[in-house]
Structure formats: C-alpha cells, structure tokens
Amino acid sequence: MTVMPTAAATEPAARKPDNPRRAPWWGVLALVLTALVFLGPLYLFVTTAFKTNEDINSWPMRLIPESLTLENFVTAWELAPFGQFLINSVVVAAIGTVLKVVLAISTAYAFAFLPFPGKRWLFVFMLGALMVPGHVTLLVNYITIGHLHLLNTYAGLILPGVASAFGTFLLHQFFRSLPYEVLEAAQIDGAGHLRTIWSFIMPMSRPAIITVGLIALIDEWNNFVWPLIVTNSVNMRTLPIGLLYLKENDGINDWGALMAGTLFVVLPVTIVFLLAQRYIVAGLAGSALRR
C-alpha cells in the first residue's frame, strides 16, 4: 500500500527571514532621549534625598554622590509630625477609595442593567460632570461642610469626593461588555441585585474595579487643595500638606530634607501602583469594548 503525500507535506515550510527587521537607529535614539527626560528628574529627586549637604551644594552638580546618608530622613521626620500625617493620609485614602469604588460599582450597575425613567439624561448629566473642574466646586463644598460642622474632621476630608464620575463611566463601559447570558442565568436562579453584583459582576470585572480603585487611591493620596482648605490644625493635616512644613520661610531650603519628605509621600502609592499595574491595561482595554 502506497501512502500519497498530502498537499501540506509537499509544500515547503515557510522560511523565516534571515535578517529580522530592526528598529531604525533614530527610533532607538528617540526612545533613549525620552527615557532620559522622564527618568532624569526622578533620579535627581531620589539621589538628593540620600545626599549630604556637601554633595547637594557642590558645583558642578555631582550626579553620583560621593557618600550616602539617611540624615535627611531623620531631619524631615523631626521637622514635621510625619507620623500623624501618615495616619491621616492612610485613613482618608483608604476610606475614600472604598466609598468611591462602592458608589461607582452600584451606580454603573444601575446605568448598565436597570431600566428607570430618565436613565439616558441622567447618564449624559453624569458625563457632563467629567468636564467640570474640581476647583469650581471648592467654595460650595466648603460652605456645605461648614454648615454640617464637619470642618477639621475626617468626614469633612472624605465626603465631598466620594462620588467619581470617571469611575462610574469606566465601570459602566466595562459592565456593558460582560456576557448578558450570565446575568440572565443569575436572575433565573433568583439572585437579587446585591448577590448579582457580589457573585457575578465583581469577579468578572476585577481588572476594571482595581483600575478604578487605584485611580481613586492616587487621587485621594495626592489631594492637596481640599485638605489644606478644610483643615486648620496640624493634627488633621495629610502628607502632601506636610511638605509645606519643610519649606523655610527665609527662602533657604534644606533640599535634602525636602526630597526625603517627598519620598515619604510618593513611595507608598508608588509601591501600590507597581503591584497593581498589570490590571490597569486589562481594565482600560476591557472598558473600551461595548456589548
């Protein structure tokens, strides 16, 4: 019995190019220059926090410090109560982020799956909130918090920012891309809205929820103007405001202590961002899809 070769066997295998296409030299150069523009200031910021005053004030500038020291961190910690600032920032950022995510999930679920009168116009109104600068509402929020006697409190720091139009819109777009058959099966099974959100929506929307939570965390952690306005005592200040206590009034700043204090502010949220960055692309990409 003779076995005839098949067409796939007789066709020659596709040859890979001997010389794969490489990026042009000018493209590589542009990437290197762009990286230097972004990483250069970051390198100077981090190294200055560990430099001695002699290295900081030397001319020409020493890009590589001759010696490293932790004295700047000790000085920054003693010049301002960074321990209390850290506690305040953690409380405000944690509670504010949780409330933002919970409200964004519930609102996006209602817009995506629940029929109610005026739904389309309310959604358009919510999108319009994205175009309003946050500083426009500062005076109104301050007057409201003052009438509620919440000035210089955690509630006054947190409540005005718990609604996130961007988070609601992002989750709404992601929810619209979910398989509707799963939700129909949940309804047939007798699941209510809360169980549907907890058991079906949230597990399938983890990348988008983490993305919204991370954006909310960064926003709460780096907020400067509102905590500066609504608080009037040192014990209620947050970390970004604490950097003002490191600035000298006579114009001569201790740049080592100032950079060390700044590192106190940016390091925690940077670590969280690096741990969760793989979810950001998936969350934003999934929100671009629409059922």
Image: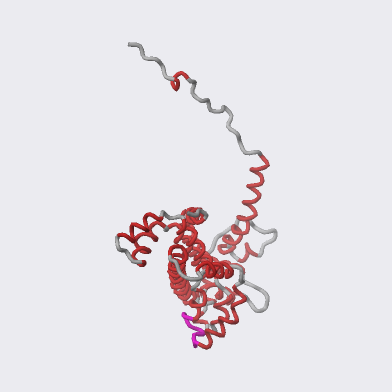
* Quarter of the rendering occupied by the N terminus: top left
Q: What residue do we see at 36% from left, 14% from top?
A: 3
Whether residue 195 appears in this view of the structure is yes
Question: Does the segment drawn in magenta span residue 153?
Answer: yes
Note whether 100 is above or below 274 in the view shown: below
Residue 260's image quarter?
Answer: bottom right
Q: What residue do we see at 54% from left, 78% from top?
A: 227
Q: Residue furthest right?
A: 60
Q: Which residues are magenta?
A: 148-155
Q: What residue do we see at 47% from left, 80% from top?
A: 155
Q: Residue furthest left?
A: 189
Q: What residue do we see at 53% from left, 28% from top?
A: 16
Question: Does the segment drawn in magenta span residue 170?
Answer: no
Residue 84 pos. (x, y %) = 47, 77
- Viewer-nearest residue: 48 or 41: 41
Note whether 146 is above or below 101 in the view shown: below
Whether residue 73 appears in this view of the structure is no
Residue 145 pos. (x, y %) = 52, 84
